[in-house]
Amino acid sequence: MIVQGQFDLLCPPAMSYALAAAWGNAEIVLVEGAGHAMSEPGVTEAVMAGINALAINHPRQ
């Protein structure tokens, strides 16, 4: 999962889409109105949702 801020100037959305295409199976979560920082509204929530989904889908052995 790639969490991308809509207005991220440091890592523009085009780079996330290129990375996702190279990986082949990545999901992009575009956070509307957000920039680059974790403190941007919606970014922390999207990252936490991704971590939770990873934990559920790949439990420890």
Image (cartoon, grey):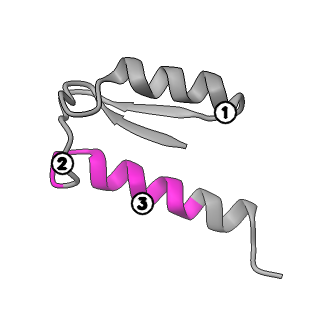
Q: Quadrant of residue 59?
A: bottom right
- Separation of marks 2 and 1 at Cα, in angstroms: 24 Å
Q: Is residue 29 left or right of residue 10?
A: right
For the point 64% across and 26% down, which residue is it? 22
Residue 37, labelled with which disc?
Answer: 2
Quarter placement of the N terminus: top right
Counting residues from the N terminus, which is met first, the one under dot 1 or under dot 3? 1
Quick check: is 43 in the magenta stretch?
Answer: yes
**Which segment did they paint magenta?**
39-52
Q: Residue under circle 1?
A: 23
From the viewer's side, name the closer residue of 17 and 48: 17
Q: Is residue 40 above or below residue 55?
A: above
The extreme top residue here reads 14
Q: Residue under circle 3?
A: 48
Q: Quadrant of residue 31?
A: top left
Tag 2: Cα neighbours inside 10 Å, few (<14), some, or many (≥20)?
few
Give the percent coordinates (x, y) of residue 47. 40, 54
Question: What amino acid type should be assigned to the residue bearing mark 1?
Answer: Trp
